[in-house]
Image (cartoon, coloured by chain):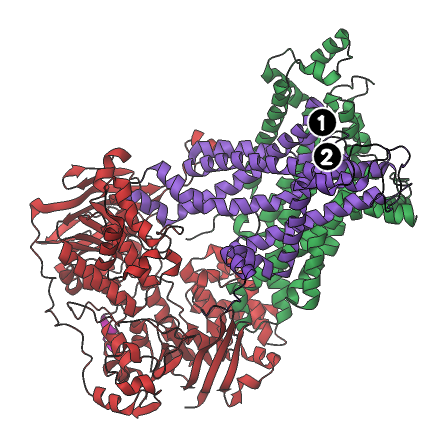
Chain colours: A red, B purple, C green
Amino acid sequence: MATLFDVRNLEVKYHTRAGVITAVRDISFDVQDGEILGIVGESGCGKSTVASAMMRLLPPNGRISRGQILFKGRDLCTMREDELRTLRGSEISVIFQDPMTGLNPVFDVQSQMLDVLRAHTRGQTTPSLRQRALQMLERVGIPDAAERIHYYPHQFSGGMRQRILIAMALMSHPAVLIADEPTSALDVTLEAQILELIRGLRAELGTAIIYISHDLGVIAQLCDRVVVMYAGQIVEKGDCAAIFRDPRHPYTRALLAAHPSHRHNVERLAAIPGRVPDLTALPAGCRFADRCEYAEPLCHAQEPGYVLSDGRQVLCHAGIVERIAGTQVAKAGTPVEAGPLVLAQPQVADVLVATEGLQTYFRDRVGMIAALRHQLPAAVRAVDGVNIHIHRGDSVGLVGESGSGKTTLGKTILRLVNSTNGRILFDGQDITHLDDGSMRPLRSRMQMIFQDPYSSLSPRMKVSSLLIEPFQIQGIRVDPREKVSELLAMVGLADEQADKYPHELSGGQARRVGVARALALRPEFLVADEPTSGLDVSVAASILNLLKDLREKLGLTYLIISHSLNIIGFVSNRMGVMYLGRLVEFGPTAEIYEHPAHPYTEALLAAISEPDPQMRDSQGRRVLLQGEIPSPKNPPPGCPFHPRCQYARPDCARQRPELTAIGPDHLVACFYPLCLGTR
Amino acid sequence: MESVSRPSSLSARLLDRVPVLGQILQRPLGALGFVIVLVFVVVTIFAPLIAPYDPAKQDFKNLLTPPSRVHILGTDYVGRDTFSRIVYGARVAVEAAFPAVSIALFFGLLLGMLAGYTGGWVDGAILILVDSIHAFPMMILALVMVALLGPSLTNVVIIIAFAMIPGYARVTRAQVLSVKENDFVEAELNLGASTARIIVRHVLPNILGPLVILAAMDLPGVITFEAALSFLGLGVQPPTPSWGSILSDGFRNIFITPWPIVASGLTLMVTTLGFTLFGETLRDVIDPRLSGTKGI
Amino acid sequence: MFTYILKRLGMTALVLLLSMVLLSLLVQVVPGDAAVVMLGNRATPEQIQKARVLMDLDQPFYVQVGRFIWRALRGDFGNDWYSGRPIIDYFKDVFWHTFVLAWASLGLAVFLGVPLGVYSASHPNSLPDRLLAVLSISFITLPSYVAGLFLLLLFAVRLKVLPATGVGNPADLWDYARHLILPATAMAIPWVGYLARLVRSSLLEVLNSNYIRVARAFGLRNRLIFYKYALKNALIPTVAVLGMGIGGMMGGAMIIEAIFARPGMGTVMLNAVSARNYPIVRAGSFIISLLFILSNLAADISYSWLDPRIQLGQGRRR
């Protein structure tokens, strides 16, 4: 195998208003022909900087200050711009994270693809180039390619656009493809499709791939070798399977331990204390020492070098590596046996929140003329008839992809969004049509933690004011300083955070403030909308632990909304799966994970990427979902899932299945549920 | 990040107190704008002390004289001192611009908030109303008003205010809509906050900033417009000195002496330049995100 | 697309209707007898009565507005009180001059401003760029009438190289053009500054976007990226602004016409105002507002024609 890329001691600096920042230091790795190399790390570790540097496409204030990047023996750092341009797109290709903005909106797909081809080929006629482009589009799975090639980007969905970008990147059969978080913005089933596509193309074209991601699961499933980065340095490098099975750097170990997984049921996640160091104020010695559970005095004084340990390069002091070698990745706390989270058994009389036939439709503003003619535009059926029961003390997880309506359901239950039909019952009381005045006392009993912590905190109010406000609204007298202290302590924040404005807080801190505010009035019912979105694994772990602890301490009932099955698996005892506004399965979490009854649930579970490379080959039972989620404005007739269901039968298109029990506590909306063996 | 160590002198402490001002002064164009605005303010306030002559005093022995030691900028066609007239003209500019913008801002804010927050048919109705006012070029509006009511300073203020309301209403509405998108409005509703509370404590503080900056940046345009109206004889009437009327007097005698035109023209230029520079730097310092097209 | 135009036309008609209503409302708001106010104190009772009839002041409000608009759309604004000529003729005589002036100014502004903006964006933060920035701001803050006066002073009075007044002989193209130079330049100056800045900032913003980064990553040449990929995106809002500007120019043309003593819509209106000849003022307002609204409409339509996202509706998927 030939060496395609040989990066040696790469160092990149950025010139910012705050001074010169060394984003990455001493980066050395190589990429072999045809292999998939993963670069994994949390946000700010410098992985994207490495990718940009390898293409020599750093932003204007970035500079490669040291090192070499050898591509097939030639040093890219010393090449002239026009030479580099001939390489880009033809020998080295890139796909980036956000497909929605990756294509030029004012030109159609064909002209953009032809421009790329023309930049790298000479003397070819337009028809032959067009043929190449068409072939590639078909290969990446664009239906009706011959017609759609004339479409404009905005006429394609996000998943389609990413496919088009992949097609453009691979059109010239490059030797290597750099993929910088290409699926982070996509739904999980879509991600599975794209990953499968990438694997297929690699097998067909022999392209080497450098896959950059923060998602340990994806990296584990995809890569041959892996590079782990932290705070601008490579901390571990080597064979993928080996590193995941037996990580030797403390950070890699901690990262794996903090990753929630429904396969290993634990009491608490092992969160990593502390924060990623500020690159302008680095500590002396090892950059990870402050957060490391194996740290010794040496670590704070002297920077480590690379140590070879069983085929891996590890950036750590030799003594520590020896200590680590051989021990299993310990997950904090005792593993609980696979089974439902131990809680009081739900009793029928104890239902706290329930909905009956709940529908929430959104309609675009209707023009006067259309209204007169009764021509209503199609409504977005965000919630399309949901019956759900949440017992007191439950932690119910709600999982689904975009367009499933899970967030809207949460907001509708809290009466933040007006329902179109159906009933909402809280503690036995019908709250569907209560006016603001009657709702106000109830609001102190049901609260929400919002998805985006920054936008849900009023930007011009200090934390202390934000935390006091609930009491002011409800007309309750409290001692401000005492109360604020109490609330901050409850979520693990120091008193000094009270005087800060939201934009001065970190992501994790802002989220905790959101939790504190939601808890201020001591509600009974809490809806958490994507509690860990945008957070790094280590920070997410601590938030999830916090949620768990608070529930036990305060006896809360949760509705946790997430697209991640791993999170739901860790933090909820019962769960519901939503698709296109309908609840398709509902029951105990463990039961559903072991025996999913609905084909969609099965597909979701199969799409999870586990950080366990050994699982890679057990994809025999992999259920790859085809197509994309239909528009909620126009759901398919009958069962909304039937067009994509591999088990579908004719009558699935005619009638809508309702939630029916297939077990004592397990409901499914399907005519031919899986575990009844009626496949 | 590390703070730059500052010298501890009075000026430094002053700059500390008004950090925004300090940042403006750090930029050369901003500093220039600030100086000009400062001069303008001083001239307006201390006009009687600065102007050597009574701006209305006529002197038939010195008609249309060029600049001299007696009259710094010369005299106009009835012997009035140009320099004094310009000094007092600044007052007229202020008397027209500030009330007009303030009134427009107030009503625009009101309408925009009503439209943005209420939505529905109220929003649609206000939009159409606002659009129809917007359909008139300001000058036409002015002509109509003057044709009906006659020229005067008060009418100028009314015209300008009326013509500017749609702009502010639209921007306010856009701001309200974008603030409404934010989750914190939902969060407040979640806590049971009343609509009034949300508007006053959460929406208003977040939209006032951009609006005030916008108004500040509109000032030069208003001053220019008032001068244009006076130039055409549609604004303040003699003997009140407006930069526009000085221009028109000079225009009538353009072949005899250029000085009234040069003097008042340059003054207008410099003043609008100063306000524009100051306003833009203010905006860049406070909220760089605003430097895009005006809200739609 | 077609329905879009139709909708916009409908909105336009509505807005125009409302504008005229507002205009008529203003007449009602005037204290005292509207006719007396307009004609002045020296009018005789017969003249006042005649005026009242001509302006339908005795009729109910909606009749006033309705009649006016109905007739206006057919070009019938009645006859002038004093001369008896159809009012429309006053405007017909001079419309062309204003039209040419407005378009000449716009053309000049685009011809100078857009390339300057493009140049600035291609060499950001260089010395020429900074100089141009200062120049642009100076141009923007120079009101067109002040510029007009200065130009007049310099070129017509002092240097005597260009004519000071009038439109010249329309049959003689060169003469006509000579008379157009100073006024068009005066009106163009603020626009040059504005366009240069607008194009520069639009381009820089576009150059920062994701798809430009992707295009670079695919190895496209810099020229292609700048002049094809970036420019088209950046010019779209510029075109929209220009479309609105053309209407605004109609208003600004008034003062310029006054300064350069050019016959035009502006001069007709101004004379009518000093004579307190309200019917002419009203007719002129209607025409100019109509032109203004139409030019906005044209801008909207061209905007949607250039930007495929709007042209083809909301796009297919989410």
Q: Is residue C18 above or below residue C159?
A: above
Chain to which the residue tagged by mark 2 belongs:
B
Q: Are marks 1 and 2 on the same chain?
A: yes
At which x and y percent is residue A145?
47, 62
Which quadrant holds residue C168? top right
Read off the magenta span.
A616-621
Q: Quadrant of the N terminus of chain C?
A: top right
Q: Is residue C91 above or below residue A127?
A: above
Q: Secondary structure at mark 1?
A: loop
Type of the residue with mark 2: Leu
At which x and y percent is residue B231?
77, 36
Q: Nearer the viewer, residue A600 or C265?
A: C265
**Chief secondary structure of the magenta portion:** helix
At which x and y percent is residue C256?
79, 40
Residue bearing mark 2: B229
Q: Residue at x 60, y 50 (%)?
A: B279
Q: Is residue B193 above or below residue C283?
A: below
Asked if the residue at tag 2 contacts the one at tag 1, i.e. Cβ–Cβ closer than 8 Å, the answer is yes
Type of the residue with mark 1: Pro
Q: Secondary structure at mark 2?
A: helix
Q: Nearer the viewer, residue A345 or A668?
A: A345
At which x and y percent is residue A455?
38, 53
Give the number of callouts. 2
* Position of residue C110 in the picture relative to residue B110 (left or right): right
Q: Residue at x 44, y 45 (%)?
A: B205
Label 1 CA crowd tier, 10 Å (few <14, some 14–19, many 20+): many
Marked residue nearer the N-terminal end (1 or 2): 1
Residue bearing mark 1: B151
Q: Nearer the viewer, residue A678 or C111?
A: C111
Q: What numbered label is drawn on residue A535?
A: none
Is residue C77 visible to us here?
A: no
